[in-house]
């Protein structure tokens, strides 16, 4: 029996399933999701590698949920499935009760790599998605300028990517997604390559942007950092080693808005200790196999 079962203060109370409260209760639903990777050069799933198996997760509209787990447990794979970038082999992934089938314009994705066009200014990089969607030039300029101001880069609108710091480039990448106003945002370790000070600053900026919206976006955030997950999230889903599934859901009952004092609180340390224990169990279990 793991320690988290003994500590009722930390472990999230099981939430009612969608079948009991109605489909509209959940923005995102993953039901018994399975993902297999065939052997190189093979299309058959026979003897394939199982990355996800029995993966269940439900997220309410406007929630900020982080995925934590051992390396190779399928965190990024599930994110790609949710974004419509990968298919899956079993179960169901739903957004607003509709099965995910391909890329959805209502899902915005931010990766660790900035993927900015080096020959375009920050302003033009933010406008790219709108241009593809056929938004008129004047409107996309206005919307891009507004979002750059939101992320604190109005003064850098005419700079090229190489003239921006790593943190600034990542904010341009976030602005590029925000500008077309998706309802769901998925982040795949967007701050992992940044120094600690910049990383903490951008965590605060992300929360500021999320909390300042008229309607909070629903966010799924993949990270390897326990502290980052606690600081940002309403709930943390801790995954097992591969084939990945959700082992434990933690409620993060820290007051919002959050700041540096939140990181230094006893409750923060208490949650960190318990999440770390669960992850350590999975890593040790993987090494024992």
Image (cartoon, helix red, strand yellow):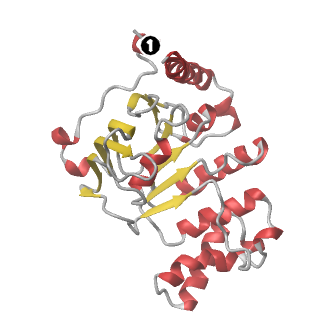
Residue 107 visible to the viewer: yes
* Foreground residue among 222 and 90: 90
Residue 213 visible to the viewer: no
Most distant residue in the front direction = 41
Q: Residues within 10 Å of mark 1 (few under 14, many from 20)?
A: few
**Does 280 appear above or below 31?**
above
* Foreground residue among 78 and 191: 78
Image coordinates of residue 49 in percent, x first then y, are 40, 39
Q: Is the N terminus in the top left, top right, bottom left or bottom right quadrant?
A: top left
Tally of numbered discs = 1
Image coordinates of residue 278 in percent, x first then y, are 50, 20
Examine the image and state in which quarter residue 48 appears: top left
* Residue that numbered label 1 is attached to: 7
Most distant residue in the right direction = 163
SS for callout 1: loop
**Does 102 appear above or below 267?**
below
Most distant residue in the bottom direction = 137
Image coordinates of residue 144 in percent, x first then y, are 60, 77
Residue plotted at (31% across, 28% down): 14
Examine the image and state in which quarter residue 178 appears: bottom right
Tell whether 31 sits left or right of 226: left
Image coordinates of residue 190 in percent, x first then y, are 62, 51
Tell whether 25 sits left or right of 72: left
* Foreground residue among 191 and 119: 119
Residue plotted at (59% across, 79% down): 127
* Foreground residue among 188 and 38: 38
Tell whether 115 sits left or right of 11: right
**Does 13 appear above or below 154?**
above
């Amino acid at each position: 029996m793991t320690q988290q079962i003994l500590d009722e203060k930390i472990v999230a109370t099981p939430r009612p399933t969608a079948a009991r409260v109605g489909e509209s209760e959940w923005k995102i639903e993953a039901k018994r999701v399975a993902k297999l990777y065939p052997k190189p050069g093979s299309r058959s799933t026979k003897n394939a590698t199982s990355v996800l198996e029995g993966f269940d997760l439900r997220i309410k509209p406007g929630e900020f949920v982080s995925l934590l787990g051992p390396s190779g447990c399928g965190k990024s794979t599930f994110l790609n499935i949710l974004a419509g970038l990968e298919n899956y082999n079993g179960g169901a992934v739903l957004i607003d009760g509709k099965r995910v089938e391909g890329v959805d314009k209502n899902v915005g994705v931010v990766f660790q790599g900035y993927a900015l066009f080096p020959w375009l200014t920050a302003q033009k990089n933010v406008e790219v998605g709108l241009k593809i969607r056929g938004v008129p030039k004047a409107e996309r300029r206005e919307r891009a300028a507004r979002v750059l101001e939101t992320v604190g880069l109005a003064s850098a609108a005419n700079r090229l990517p190489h003239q921006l710091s790593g943190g600034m480039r990542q904010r341009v990448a976030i602005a590029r997604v925000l500008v077309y106003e998706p309802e769901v945002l998925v982040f795949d370790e967007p701050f992992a390559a940044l120094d600690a000070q910049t990383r903490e600053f951008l965590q605060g900026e992300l929360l500021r942007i999320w909390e300042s919206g008229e309607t909070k976006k629903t966010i799924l955030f993949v990270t390897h950092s326990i502290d980052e997950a606690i600081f940002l999230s309403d709930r943390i889903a801790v995954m097992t080693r591969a084939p990945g599934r959700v082992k434990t859901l933690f409620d993060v009952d820290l007051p919002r808005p959050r700041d540096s004092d939140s990181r230094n609180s006893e409750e923060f340390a208490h949650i960190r200790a318990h999440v770390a224990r669960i992850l350590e169990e999975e890593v040790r279990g993987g090494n024992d196999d």
